[in-house]
C-alpha cells in the first residue's frame, strides 16, 4: 500500500513538472516575441537614424545574433530575405528570395514544371515573408502577400531535361515595408568576389533526415563546384547542367531536398549577403527521394542579375557595380587611344555624363545609359584582365590567361581610337577620323518618353497639306506628318527612327526600327515606294511598293498610315487604328468591327480558320468577346465593362491573322508573316479554340481534353 501511494505521488509530481514545463515553454515563446518587440522599440528609440540606414542596406541582418559554428538551425531574423511560396490550400511548395520591396526570385520549375507537370497562375500563389516557424502564424514581423505577376525566364524549356535558366520572378501585389525580419538580399556588387566564392549558405524549410518538412528554416554550408567539375562527377549531371548552372553540397548525407527548390544560396562578403544561386534540381535515389549523398544543381544567379533587376522584362546578364573608378591614365575620360586599357571596374564616360562603358569585375564590358544597361560583351564569368585599344586598331578584351574573349575586328588600322560620344554611340575611328566600328546606339539624355520630339520639331513646310506625302516629297530629321484631327503624328526622329505615336501620351505604336542610323530623309518616291535613307545614301527601310508611280502616303484621322495608288487602292498600311475619344484604359472597338462571318457558330475556330484585324469571337451568352485588334493584340474581354481579362501581349505589330492551325497550334502572325504569339499546342491535329460562356478561352483536342486556356473565368 505504501509502495503504490509512493508511485502515485511520483506520477503526480511528474505530471505537474510536465505541465509546468509546457507552460514555461509557452511563456518563453510569448516572452521571446514580447522581448523582441521591446528590444526593437528600444533600439528604434535609441537610434532611429542608424536603424533606417541599416534597413535601407541590402543583405544585412537587423537582429543581432551571436555567431553559430557548425549549427544547422537558423535563428530568427538571420536570413530576413527568406521567402516561402504557398498554394491556395496554405501548403508550402517552394522557397524564394526577396530582392526588392516587391519582387521575389524563385526557380522556374516551381511555377512551371518540367513536361507540363504543373503550372501556377499568380492567383494560385501567395508569399510569406519574415517567417521563422511555419507553425506559428502570430510571429512578429510576418507578412503575407499575393502575387501580381509571374515572369519566367524565356530560356526555361519544359520540354527537355536540361535545367538551364531555371529562374522566375514573382512581382508582389503590394510593396513590402522592411522591418527587422524582412530585408532584401543583395544582387549587384563585387561580382568577381561573389563568383569566386568556394562556399555559400543554403537556407530552406525542405525535408530533413526524418523525411518530414521542417517547420523551422535549416541552414547548411554548401561547397561550390563549377559547371565543368560537376558535370564529370556523375553521368546524369550532363543532362541537367548548363554553363549557367553550378552544383554544390557536402555530399555526406546533408544537402538540398524536396521543399528547398527555389530557395537561395548566399555568399557573405564585406558584411553583406549576396544571392549566388537558386536551388534547382537534385538527383533521386532508388526510393525516388532526394539523394543527399551527391550534389544538387543551382541556377547561377550572377548570370541573371540584370534580368532579375528588370523584374523579368529585359534579358541582360549584368548588373551595375557601385565600386567603380573612371579611367585616370589620360585627360580625355571618354576615349581610349592606342595602347590604353580599362582594368576591372574602370570605365570611360561620355562628356555629358550620360553614358558609361564599364569593364566589370565579372569579365563583362557593359554599356550603360545612366543606370540602364543597353549592351554587353556577353563575356561574364571570364577571369578578368583588361580591355584594350590595341596599337593595330583592334579593341580587345583579354581574360586572365591573356586570351581574347571579345574583339571589334578592326585590326590593320594603326592609330585608331575608341570614343564614347555625347549622342550615346560607341565608335572606333581610324587615324583619318573615319568610323570603322560602332555600336550604333543613340540616345538623348533629356528624353523623358520613348518618342524624342525636340522643341525644334516642325511639320513639313513643302506643301500646305501636312498629313500627306506625294511623289518626291520627303521628311527630314525632326519633321513630321500629323493627322487632320491633330491626334496622331509620324515623326522622322533625329536618331534615324520613323515613329508613329499618339500626341496625348507620346506613346509609340509603331517604329521603323532604324534607330541608331545617321539621318538623311524619309521619302515618298515617284515610283510609289516609301523609303528611309541614312546619311550615306543607304536604304534602311522601304515599304516595297515600287512600280506604282503617282502613289501617296497619308496619315488618316482613324490613325492608319496608308499608301494609296492612283486608283485609290491600298498598297501598304500599318493597319493601326485609334479613336482619339477613347480613354486609355478602354478597349477600342471601331464601328466596323465584325464577328467572323466564315461560319455560323461564332464562338469557335476550327483548323485553318482565322481572325483578321478587328474580327472577334463572341460567347454564346453574348457576354464575352475575344477580338484580334488592329494594333496586333488579341484581347479577351467582358463586353459590358470593356475591361480586358487576358491579352496576347503582342501590341505594336502590324496585324495579319490569328489562326487555329490544322496541327492544333493557335498562332498570331504579323504583316511580315512572322509568328508573334503561339499557344504551343502543335501535335494536336483536329483541335479547336472555344470562347466559353464563363469567359475562358480554351483549346480542346479531338478527345475533348483542354490543352491550353487563358484561365480568364469570370461571371457574366
Image: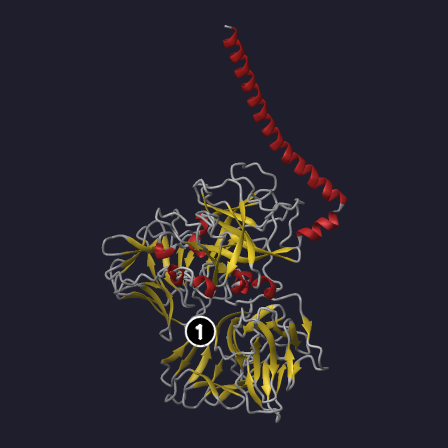
Q: Residue furthest top?
A: 1
Residue drawn at the location 58% of the way across and 42% of the way down: 142
Observer able to see residue 649: no
Residue drawn at the location 37% of the way across and 54% of the way down: 624
Specify whether 511 is left or right of 609.
right
The residue lying toward the viewer, choosing from 439 and 549, is: 439
The residue lying toward the viewer, choosing from 500 and 345, is: 345
- Image-quadrant location for residue 681: bottom left
Give the residue pinned by disc 1.
560
The residue lying toward the viewer, choosing from 629 and 79, is: 79
Q: Residue furthest front?
A: 3
Observer able to see residue 105: yes
Q: Position of residue 21 (x, y in %)?
A: 58, 25
Q: Residue furthest bottom?
A: 432
Name the colouring of the figure: secondary structure
Q: Is residue 250 above or below residue 419?
A: above
Residue drawn at the location 24% of the way across and 59% of the way down: 600
Q: Position of residue 519 (x, y in %)?
A: 55, 85
Q: Residues within 10 Å of mark 1 (few under 14, many from 20)?
A: some
Q: Position of residue 72 (x, y in %)?
A: 55, 44
Q: Secondary structure at mark 1?
A: loop
Specify whether 712 is left or right of 485.
left
Q: Position of residue 267 (x, y in %)?
A: 58, 56
Q: Is residue 540 above or below residue 173?
A: below
Number of labelled discs?
1
Amino acid at each position: 500500500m505504501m509502495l503504490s501511494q509512493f508511485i502515485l505521488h511520483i506520477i503526480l509530481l511528474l505530471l505537474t513538472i510536465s505541465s509546468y514545463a509546457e507552460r514555461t515553454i509557452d511563456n518563453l515563446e510569448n516572452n521571446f516575441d514580447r522581448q523582441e518587440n521591446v528590444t526593437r522599440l528600444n533600439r528604434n528609440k535609441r537610434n532611429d537614424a542608424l536603424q533606417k540606414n541599416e534597413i535601407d542596406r541590402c543583405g544585412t541582418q537587423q537582429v543581432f545574433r551571436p555567431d553559430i559554428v557548425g549549427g544547422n538551425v537558423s535563428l530568427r531574423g538571420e536570413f530576413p530575405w527568406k521567402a516561402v511560396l504557398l498554394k491556395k490550400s496554405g501548403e508550402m511548395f517552394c522557397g524564394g528570395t526577396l530582392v526588392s520591396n516587391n519582387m521575389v526570385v524563385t526557380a522556374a520549375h516551381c511555377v512551371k514544371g518540367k513536361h507540363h507537370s504543373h503550372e501556377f497562375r499568380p492567383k494560385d500563389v501567395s508569399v510569406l515573408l519574415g517567417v521563422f516557424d511555419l507553425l506559428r502564424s502570430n510571429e512578429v514581423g510576418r507578412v503575407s502577400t499575393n502575387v501580381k505577376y509571374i515572369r519566367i525566364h524565356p530560356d526555361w524549356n519544359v520540354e527537355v531535361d536540361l535545367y538551364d535558366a531555371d529562374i522566375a520572378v514573382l512581382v508582389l501585389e503590394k510593396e513590402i515595408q522592411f522591418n527587422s525580419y524582412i530585408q532584401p538580399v543583395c544582387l549587384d556588387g563585387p561580382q568577381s568576389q561573389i563568383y569566386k566564392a568556394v562556399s555559400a549558405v543554403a537556407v530552406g524549410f525542405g525535408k530533413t533526415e526524418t523525411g518530414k518538412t521542417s517547420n523551422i528554416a535549416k541552414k547548411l554550408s554548401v561547397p561550390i563546384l563549377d559547371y565543368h567539375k560537376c558535370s564529370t562527377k556523375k553521368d546524369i549531371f550532363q543532362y541537367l547542367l548548363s554553363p549557367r548552372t553550378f552544383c554544390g553540397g557536402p555530399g555526406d548525407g546533408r544537402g538540398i531536398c524536396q521543399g528547398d527548390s527555389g530557395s537561395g544560396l548566399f555568399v557573405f562578403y564585406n558584411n553583406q549577403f549576396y544571392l549566388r544561386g537558386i536551388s534547382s534540381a537534385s538527383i533521386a535515389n532508388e526510393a525516388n527521394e532526394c539523394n543527399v549523398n551527391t550534389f544538387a544543381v543551382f541556377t547561377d544567379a550572377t548570370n541573371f542579375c540584370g534580368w532579375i533587376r528588370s523584374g523579368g522584362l529585359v534579358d541582360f546578364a549584368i548588373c551595375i557595380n557601385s565600386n567603380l573608378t573612371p579611367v585616370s591614365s589620360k585627360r580625355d575620360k571618354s576615349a581610349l587611344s592606342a595602347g590604353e586599357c580599362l582594368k576591372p571596374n574602370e570605365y570611360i564616360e561620355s562628356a555629358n555624363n550620360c553614358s558609361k562603358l564599364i569593364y566589370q569585375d565579372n569579365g563583362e564590358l557593359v554599356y550603360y545609359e545612366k543606370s540602364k544597361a543597353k549592351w554587353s560583351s556577353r563575356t561574364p564569368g571570364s577571369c578578368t584582365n583588361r580591355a584594350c585599344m590595341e596599337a593595330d586598331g583592334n579593341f580587345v578584351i583579354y581574360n586572365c590567361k591573356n586570351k581574347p574573349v571579345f574583339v571589334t575586328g578592326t585590326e590593320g588600322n594603326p592609330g585608331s581610337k575608341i570614343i564614347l560620344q555625347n549622342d550615346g554611340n560607341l565608335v572606333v575611328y581610324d587615324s583619318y577620323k573615319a568610323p570603322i566600328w560602332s555600336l550604333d546606339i543613340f540616345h538623348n539624355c533629356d528624353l523623358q518618353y520613348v518618342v524624342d520630339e525636340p522643341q525644334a520639331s516642325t511639320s513639313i513646310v513643302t506643301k500646305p497639306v501636312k498629313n500627306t506625302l506625294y511623289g518626291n516629297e520627303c521628311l527630314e530629321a525632326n519633321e513630321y506628318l500629323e493627322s487632320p484631327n491633330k491626334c496622331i503624328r509620324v515623326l522622322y526622329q533625329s536618331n534615324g527612327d520613323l515613329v508613329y505615336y499618339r500626341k496625348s501620351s507620346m506613346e509609340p505604336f509603331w517604329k521603323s526600327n532604324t534607330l541608331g542610323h545617321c539621318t538623311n530623309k524619309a521619302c515618298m518616291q515617284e515610283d510609289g515606294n516609301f523609303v528611309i535613307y541614312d546619311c550615306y545614301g543607304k536604304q534602311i527601310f522601304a515599304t516595297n511598293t515600287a512600280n506604282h508611280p503617282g502613289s501617296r502616303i497619308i496619315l488618316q484621322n482613324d490613325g492608319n498610315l496608308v499608301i494609296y495608288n492612283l486608283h485609290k487602292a491600298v498598297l501598304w498600311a500599318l493597319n493601326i487604328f485609334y479613336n482619339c475619344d477613347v480613354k486609355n484604359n478602354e478597349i477600342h472597338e471601331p464601328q466596323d468591327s465584325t464577328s467572323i462571318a466564315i461560319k455560323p457558330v461564332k464562338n469557335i475556330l476550327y483548323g485553318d480558320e482565322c481572325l483578321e484585324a478587328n474580327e472577334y469571337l463572341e460567347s454564346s451568352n453574348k457576354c464575352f468577346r475575344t477580338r484580334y485588334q488592329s494594333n496586333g493584340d488579341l484581347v479577351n474581354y467582358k463586353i459590358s465593362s470593356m475591361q480586358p481579362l487576358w491579352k496576347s501581349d503582342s501590341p505594336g505589330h502590324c496585324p495579319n491573322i490569328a489562326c487555329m492551325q490544322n496541327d492544333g497550334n493557335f498562332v498570331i502572325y504579323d504583316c511580315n508573316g512572322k509568328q508573334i504569339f503561339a499557344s504551343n499546342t502543335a501535335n494536336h491535329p483536329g483541335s479547336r479554340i472555344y470562347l466559353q460562356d464563363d469567359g475562358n478561352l480554351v483549346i480542346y483536342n479531338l478527345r475533348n481534353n483542354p490543352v491550353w486556356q487563358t484561365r480568364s473565368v469570370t461571371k457574366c
